Image: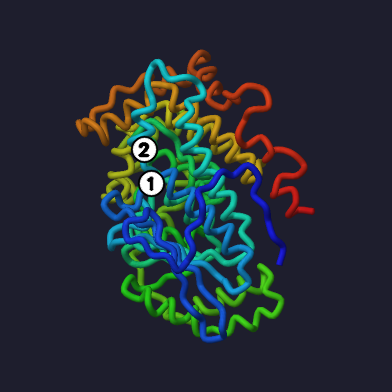
């Protein structure tokens, strides 16, 4: 098996799989297979915060992945969340909020730590040489979506609800969102990024964010399928053969009935809106109920659509401009290049007023009445466009960007192409 090294990744000392600390932010365990191998089990263990992703959780996950990568007994890894409400509802941004102020430096050291560890983890997972199997039950948002997109085998249930709602807090669809939203059909990803629309398991299947539909009560049966399959069939134990065995095991489980996919139902209407012109044209349609009804009366009056429209209309204009611009900037970029660009953007957001104001209004004071710094009209003016573009500039001094090695010829993406 090829061993992949992840340079410049600062991680906590890994916990061994036989150590169980019920209070730890991530729990690690193993399940024995019938053929003498092991499944690694990783559980995000912060159910009170809906398993919100923290710096420590990223460090622990990364360290354990690195340890299990070279353990020949481990053939696949299952990632799930504790509790019955969520896999992961996003990032734990309270400490990040506390670090943001008018006097904070650019780049903000904690923002660099927070987003840097998170993005390194996604990259590590995307290039991981063993199957990463997501149990995507319950709420999946923001950082949880980054984890979902990075797994090789994604399972959803009838309880799965996912979204990229960063427009509500003055951020943008980060966590590799610029990469995976771009890959959704008919520009549905752009619609999800702008509106924060809440989607279900069928939508995840439609957008290739998931491959398998399983009843929410059948987690134990899925583990049984994975432990009973013959992993020895992957005689070379390379990534391709392990992935095939994992796929065969998961495909053998009965398919669950999921709620209807709104994206599959309305993709033509969404495509028409997202292809209506530039952001100002899209904005005009998203604010015009009559125009939307002319496109599709059912789409315009659906409660799902109405909720998405309300989120957009109340959301941050700077976030809308960043989302739209990044969607097109990511067209020809690799995953590593996208994450590099997202780190620049996220660190700039942490230094600018809208992110802090959005978190304040939604999570701190909870008045849900953010005072955004600019209108969309202002964002689209020449001065406003310059302001938006400044978010993508490298905020670090020469040679100090924490992800600088991701742009060279030795980047993992370049290695895989070779």
Q: CA distance from mark 2 to mark 1?
A: 9 Å
- Give the labeled residue for mark 2: 93
Residue at disc 1, secondary structure:
loop
- Tell me if 100 is positioned left or right of 388 in this view: left
Residue 26: where, in percent of width, then height?
A: 40, 56
Look at the picture and state if 88 lies above or below 42: above
Q: Secondary structure at mark 2?
A: loop
Q: Which residue is mark 1?
A: 90
Q: Taking 75 as reference, is 93 left or right?
A: left
Above or below: residue 236 compared with residue 119: below
Residue 217 in sight from this viewpoint: yes
Q: Residue at x 40, y 47 (%)?
A: 53
Residue depicted at x 32% and y 26%: 357
Q: Is residue 124 left or right of residue 162?
A: right
In the rendered image, the residue lying farthest to the top is 383
Where 44 sits versus 374, above or below?
A: below
Label count reads 2
Q: Quadrant of the N terminus?
A: bottom right
Please tell me how crowded label 2 is: few (under 14), some (14-19), or many (20+) other residues with Cα within 10 Å: some
Q: Nearer the viewer, residue 347 or 138?
A: 347
| Circle 1 residues within 10 Å: few <14, some 14–19, many ≥20 | many
- Front label number (2 vs 1): 2
Query: Residue 273, image x and y in percent?
Result: 45, 41
* Front residue of this view, candidates 283 and 39: 39
Residue depicted at x 60% and y 81%: 231
Q: Is residue 208 left or right of residue 237?
A: left
- Residue 161 at what x, y percent from top left? 34, 56
Rendering colour mode: rainbow
Task: Say whether marks 2 and 1 touch (CB < 8 Å).
Answer: yes
Q: Identify the image quadrant of residue 152.
A: bottom right
Res 287 visible? no
**Where in the figure is residue 179, as x and y percent of width and height?**
56, 45
């Amino acid at each position: 098996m090829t061993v992949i090294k992840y340079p410049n990744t600062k991680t906590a000392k890994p916990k061994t799989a036989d150590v169980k600390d019920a209070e730890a932010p991530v729990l690690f365990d193993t399940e024995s297979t019938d053929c003498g191998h092991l499944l690694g089990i990783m559980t995000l263990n912060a159910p009170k915060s809906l398993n919100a992703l923290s710096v420590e959780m990223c460090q622990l996950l990364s360290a354990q992945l690195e340890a299990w990568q070279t353990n020949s007994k481990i053939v696949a890894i299952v990632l799930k969340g504790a509790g019955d409400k969520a896999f992961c509802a996003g990032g734990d941004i309270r400490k990040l909020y506390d670090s943001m102020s008018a006097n904070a430096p650019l780049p903000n050291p904690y923002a660099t730590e927070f987003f840097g560890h998170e993005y390194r983890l996604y990259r590590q997972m995307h290039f991981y040489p063993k199957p990463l199997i997501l149990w995507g039950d319950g709420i999946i948002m923001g950082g949880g979506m980054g984890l979902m997109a990075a797994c090789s085998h994604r399972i959803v249930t009838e309880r799965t609800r996912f979204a990229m709602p960063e427009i509500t807090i003055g951020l943008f669809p980060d966590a590799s969102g610029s990469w995976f939203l771009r890959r959704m059909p008919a520009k549905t990803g752009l619609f999800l990024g702008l509106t924060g629309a809440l989607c279900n398991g069928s939508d995840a299947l439609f957008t290739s964010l998931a491959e398998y539909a399983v009843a929410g009560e059948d987690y134990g049966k899925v583990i049984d399928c994975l432990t009973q399959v013959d992993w020895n069939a992957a005689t070379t134990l390379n990534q391709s053969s392990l992935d095939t065995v994992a796929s065969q095991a998961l495909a053998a489980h009965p398919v669950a009935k999921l709620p209807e996919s709104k994206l599959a139902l309305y993709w033509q209407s969404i495509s028409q809106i997202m292809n209506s012109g530039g952001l100002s044209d899209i904005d005009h349609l998203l604010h015009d109920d009559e125009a939307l009804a002319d496109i599709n009366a059912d789409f315009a009056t659906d409660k799902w659509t109405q909720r998405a429209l309300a989120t957009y209309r109340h959301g941050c204009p700077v976030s809308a401009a960043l989302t739209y611009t990044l969607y097109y900037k990511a067209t020809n970029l690799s995953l590593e290049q996208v994450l590099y660009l997202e780190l620049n953007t996220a660190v700039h957001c942490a230094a600018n007023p809208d992110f802090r104001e959005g978190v304040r209004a939604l999570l701190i004071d909870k008045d849900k009445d953010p005072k955004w710094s600019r209108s969309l009209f202002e964002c689209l003016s020449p001065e406003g466009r310059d302001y938006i573009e400044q978010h993508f500039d490298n905020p670090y001094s020469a040679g100090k960007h924490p992800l600088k090695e991701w742009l060279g010829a030795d980047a993992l993406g370049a290695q895989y192409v070779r």
